[in-house]
Image: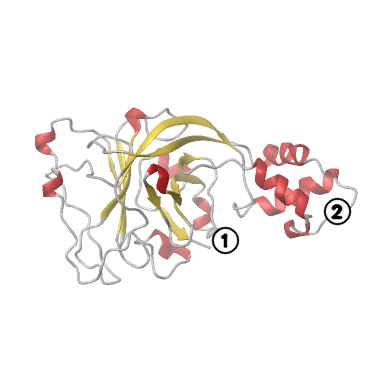
Amino acid sequence: MDIKQIMSKVNEILSPQPTVKFTVVKAETGLFDNKIGGTPYFPKDMEYPTGKDNGYEGQPLTLLAQLNFEKLPHIPDFPEKGILQFFIAGDDMYGMSSECYGESLMKQDNFRVIYHENIITDESKLLSPGEIPKYSGDDEETLPFTGEYLLSAPEKCEMPANDCDYRFGDVFVKCYNEVADEPIENFWDIDEDTYNALNESSETGDAFIGGYPVFTQSDPREDDDVLSECDVVLFELDSCDNSKNGIDIMWGDAGTGCFLISRDRLKALDFSRVIYNYDCC
């Protein structure tokens, strides 16, 4: 079966999406950098984000990732300026809702998405490393990463849909049956060779914005009219364990962490309703 022919048809229905991919590099980072961990850009006159449940009440959240759009190639509907940040709790769910489904995944109790539209360049007005609030709970913090990493060499490209997206299976079956001698009823009826060829053709990355999400289990948006509106990958960070290069990013058992938003809210710079989903093998 010619996977390229099938995917060409799939792409006509689920069009490849503009994407910025990052290379994760072990390095010290500055306040204004694109990064994982480290000291966040944070004005002194703002209230620092804290947790609200799961034993994290009142405890400061930890910077997971920071994106400075003034240092990124622009893709449609994303900001062209400002800094976007993702904070999470160091609890047993990495800040994701313990309910794990539905609108609870948008509940920013133990995670927070913060957008600074206008960047303050005077560092005396920003929190220094020593001024960032520290976790003081009884339990040990559990985070999907150790240290800090630069999100380097942002590359603008297009990412085709993959079989993690809840819409992909039905679309693939339709396109497959248009060219196959023997039709299939569902996605899991494809043979091993076709499935392996499909995986080889998939394009993802260790960290990216835009494109299509990657999940290690199921797409939380499936069969949910509210969550399905979140059609844009605001940010995704996948597990990346490379001891040779000093990289230790691991979501549970080789999982992924993904933030999704509706295109309308993204265009309006409204980050109050964002899906945060973490899953692992």
Q: Which residue is mark 2?
A: 183
Identified at 86% across, 47% down, the residue is 180
Q: Which mark is residue 148?
A: none
Q: Position of residue 43 (x, y in %)?
A: 16, 42
- Is residue 250 toward the left or the right of residue 204 in the image? left
Identified at 40% across, 59% down, the residue is 106
Q: Amino acid at mark 1?
A: Ser
Q: Position of residue 190 (x, y in %)?
A: 78, 55
Quadrant assignment, res 50: bottom left
Q: Position of residue 186 (x, y in %)?
A: 76, 59
Identified at 32% across, 53% down, the residue is 146
The number of numbered discs placed on residues in the rendered structure image is 2
Q: Please name whichever residue, 264 or 158, is drawn nearer the observer in this view of the structure.
A: 158
Q: Amino acid at mark 2?
A: Pro
How far apart are the alpha carbons under marks 1 and 2? 25 Å
In this view, which residue lies farthest toward the front? 244
Assess disc 2: are there few (<14), some (14-19) or many (≥20) residues with their C-alpha within 10 Å of its C-alpha: some
Judging from the image, what secondary structure is the residue with disc 2 in?
Answer: loop
Assess disc 1: are there few (<14), some (14-19) or many (≥20) residues with their C-alpha within 10 Å of its C-alpha: few
- Is residue 173 toward the left or the right of residue 34 in the image? right
Identified at 18% across, 33% down, the residue is 120
Q: Which residue is mark 1?
A: 218
Image quadrant occupied by the N terminus: top right
Q: Are marks 1 and 2 in contact (CB under 8 Å)?
A: no
Q: Position of residue 140 (x, y in %)?
A: 26, 67
Quadrant assignment, res 138: bottom left
Judging from the image, what secondary structure is the residue with disc 1 in?
Answer: loop
State whether residue 3 is above or below residue 104. Answer: above
